[in-house]
Amino acid sequence: MDQETVRTICYLARLQIDEDKAQKIESDLETIIEMIGGLQAFDTENIQPLYSPLEKTAFMHEDIENSDNQKEKFLQNAAASNEDYFLVPRVVE
Amino acid sequence: MVWETVIGIETHVQLSTKTKLFSRASTEFGKSPNTNVNLIDCGLPGVLPSVNKEAFYKAIRFGLAVGAKINQTSIFDRKNYFYADLPKGYQITQMDLPIVLGGTLDIETEEGIKTVNITRAHLEEDAGKSIHDQFDGYSAIDLNRAGTPLLEIVSEPEISSAKEAVAYMKAMHQLVTYLDVSDGNMSQGSLRCDANVSVRKVGDTELGTRTEIKNINSFRFVEKAINFEVKRQIKQLENGETVTQETRLYDSIKDETRPMRSKEFANDYRYFPEPDLVPVTVTEEQVNEIRSAMGEPPSVLRKTLADRWKIPANDAGVLVNQGPELVRYFEDLATRVGEGKVASNWMQQDVLRTLNERGGNITDFPVRPEAVADIIARVQKGDFDTSRGREIFASVVEKGASVAEVVAGMGIAAVDDGDLRALCEELIAENPKIVADVKGGKEQAAGGLIGKAKRKNPNVNPAKVRALAIELIQALP
Amino acid sequence: MSIQFKTIRELRDMLDTKAISCEELANDTHKLAEDLKELNCFVTMNKDASIEKSKIIDQAEKADSVLSGIPLAQKDLFCTEGLRTTCSSKILSNFIPPYTATAVMKLESAGSITIGKTNMDEFAMGSSNETSYFGNVHNPWKKGYVPGGSSGGSAAAVAAGIVPAATGTDTGGSIRQPAAHCGITGIKPTYGRVSRWGMIAFASSLDQAGPLARSAEDCAILLNEMSGHDSKDTTSLDIESTDLLHTINQPIKGLKIGIVKEFSLGDLDSEVQNRFEDSKKLYESLGAEFVEISLPNISASVPTYYSIAPAECSSNLSRFDGVRFGHRAENTDDLNDLYIKSRSEGFGDEVKRRILIGTYALSAGYYDAYYKKAQQVRRLIKNDFALAFESIDLIMTPTSPGTAFAFGSKGTQNPIELYLEDLFTISSNLAGLPAISIPHGKVNSMPAGLQLIGNFLREDQILNAAHIFQQNSSFHLDKPSMEEF
């Protein structure tokens, strides 16, 4: 697994690995990826992926409001908020 | 160097459901921040999405109206990326198996009707809103909009100019409002347009590099943004430069497009099927129910009405544009009257005009087709003329009384033949010049008597007055 | 009268005969938890609210359900309104949910009292309860030894006799394996049997909630209450609920039990094999018949699981971004910096590893080879089971290839070592099948577990087989001495 790939997936996941742990984690990742690579040995031609153990279809709900808004509680849980909004460092688009 | 423009449009239509796509929070516009948010919309740990049936039905209605294939089984996928207004860190959308596939939309161009092919349309949830300039050093997040159902409609790159793009958006707007799929309000964000624009030399078959102009929110800006972008790309290419594939925003104040802040790494959305939502299936029966409930799509309906009632295409268009309820009203009236053109005239000149003045919709309009038909019948019978009929109509609307009551109240009564004769004789006696003209062969001069006749008795039928006056004058020695 | 090590039935008796009041029971439970806090099986105690509830129950004329007043521990993966819920992670160390998970609500509506939230592997990722932000949980049978994971705290709380039962979650064996390592009973139901609403998601298509208790019968009591369709969870099954106690006593003569050829039990530790043989003999003496079956693709279980679970978790854990709840890093330059720092500070190493693997498995260019491939192999595994179940009623395996080990002695060099702990349990999560673990003796003086895997929706059958085993043996009655604590 090259450095570039590791950096990319770390960024996609918004994770930073500490310098002192970097090597161990990278080698762990390689080990695991090698292990899961063992799947290639299995013949899956014409096999549909099984995304959920249930072969059922979704129940759909009616378009009726059932609001359980708890604005204060939601905002309180946030590390930064005012009485109306969640706050984050300013984004420049 | 002659250049041609190639445009593909992605329209994001906010569906007019009462609640969100995956939660039962309200979608009502204009509420105070973070109040249309429930546990699911907040993306709290442990919450699960649940599908809104009405959103599906609206999407299917759209698909049927554009003649698309409805995928009875459709799957939701996760599109993974990080942004402050995306609470879960992924958007639930549809990738491989969207609800609608294909279809067409007719647009009005200067050269006539052009058919644009639609690639697909799928359901996805909207993100919340970020406000960047209200709080010093912070961006504020409002999740009211997060989870609102969107139908993303993708066109083939078959649009050839900014004007056509506007026509496409207008046709889309008309269609989705007609179908009650969306309120189509661009300024409120119910209808958003992303335009993929590229240019190439005429004769080239390969597409040029395209840029995406995002989130254009008015018809006017669609035209201006595309015009600017086309000019910009042509200029670049003529200078020997290449067009960079990128996303751009339209700045309406400066009337220019500019690139969005470039991201360090290209975004890999890592789509995979949403494991919290098993596939959604709609049965053949349900699709048929939706199909029969919605009636014909507007493009077909315009033609049907024009043919069925022998009215000009334009008239049919005006009526259809008002929506299915008004079409129903018109057809009820036309059936009663037995004739299309007259009914159509009354619809446009009286019903629609009054409706627009008063506001409200046709279902609440106090004057029902039978009343209008009554007035028309009386005009045709000769009880009074059309302009009198209009007055009666206005009065019925204003007073809320019945036609008969208004007619009686205005003292409109049929003028019996004896009185009519007497009145004509009076007129003849009083207007020797007109008599002389008519006698001399100018029958149209008799028209001058009509106004005077009405002043004597407003209930006279002008045609009858004219005919009788001419008859009497001719009979004079 | 000591309440330690009592079963639900025994406590019910004590309450009904007024040998003890609910309030006394609740207080005694809290005292016991306090005395044994060295086990570190609880993250948050629910003292005030639980005492309040016990008082209210005492005021009622008589108990209206078997669980009325019974103290339970809830795994700290279930959202509990007003009561801190952490998933044993720093990133949620201050999170107070505004709502309660359906499974917990059902148990509380049935009258049970939530004593506290139990420690676990961080975000349920682990097989030894060594990844918790709040420190390791001790196995009540031996200090300094793991209880198994990820529901280590729940298993320890039950094994130590603090509570008669607890809830856990099982994604790859996280109920069954700690139950085995701690000498108690734990069942993972059929996928979709119990609502996942309020259960903080690790791997959505694999996670299931279930009970841990001192017997199959007690598990059935809890599972009866926890099960049921929930319209808030579209993956929950809309089926008639059945009383799992109704058939629990049925004789098992003629029961066909399959032994999986490909599991090569002959390669396991000889003591593990001996326990397995002993249990086989017991079942034969009770009338069961054993058949060798083949699950040809079963060796793919571990790689399949470790492609799918990390992929789903990498997405499920994206919501932990420091914006609306949970730990937010200080001194960040911009939004991206906030994400990166908050998440990196808030997640432990195992969680980060799995998120990275998952991100990789889903990324462009790798999706087909890893995630999609794994889901295809998953179908092969499911089909194997379906075929096998045409000729047998249940499948029997050891729950784990080994028993509880000393802290830090496995997986520190090579993470795969720990992943292989789940060898026998993982496949039932992939196929969505129900499976139970019951204690069946000791291996090197530590508890060992026997696993029964049932067909789709046949919890009744595995509970029945487990119960009959327990009626004819006494392993589930063994108690740790607790001298070290």
Image (cartoon, rainbow, N blue to C red):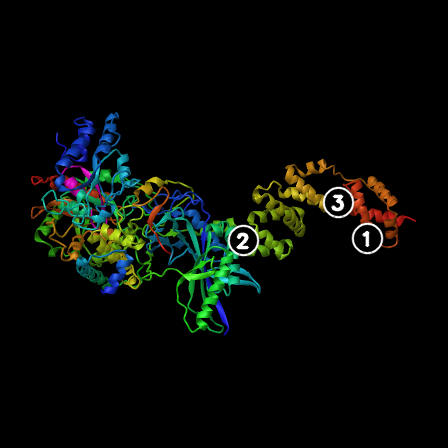
Looking at the image, residue B84 sits to the left or right of residue C397; the answer is right
The residue tagged 1 is B444
Q: CA distance from mark 3 to mark 2?
A: 38 Å
Left/right placement of residue C6 relative to residue B415 reads left
**Callout 2: SS:** loop
Pointer 1: residues within 10 angstroms few (<14), some, or many (20+)? few
CA gap, disc 1 and disc 2: 48 Å
Nearer to us of marks 1 and 2 is: 1
Q: How many marks?
A: 3
Q: Quadrant of the C terminus of chain C?
A: top left
- Which tag is nearer the camera, tag 3 or tag 1? 1
Dot in front, 3 or 2: 3
Mark 2 belongs to which amino acid? Glu
x and y percentages locating residue B446 in the rendered image: 82, 50
Tag 2 residue: B296
Residue B325, image x and y in percent?
56, 47
Asked if residue B178 can be seen in this view, the reply is: yes
Q: Chain of mark 2?
A: B
Q: Is residue C150 magenta?
A: no
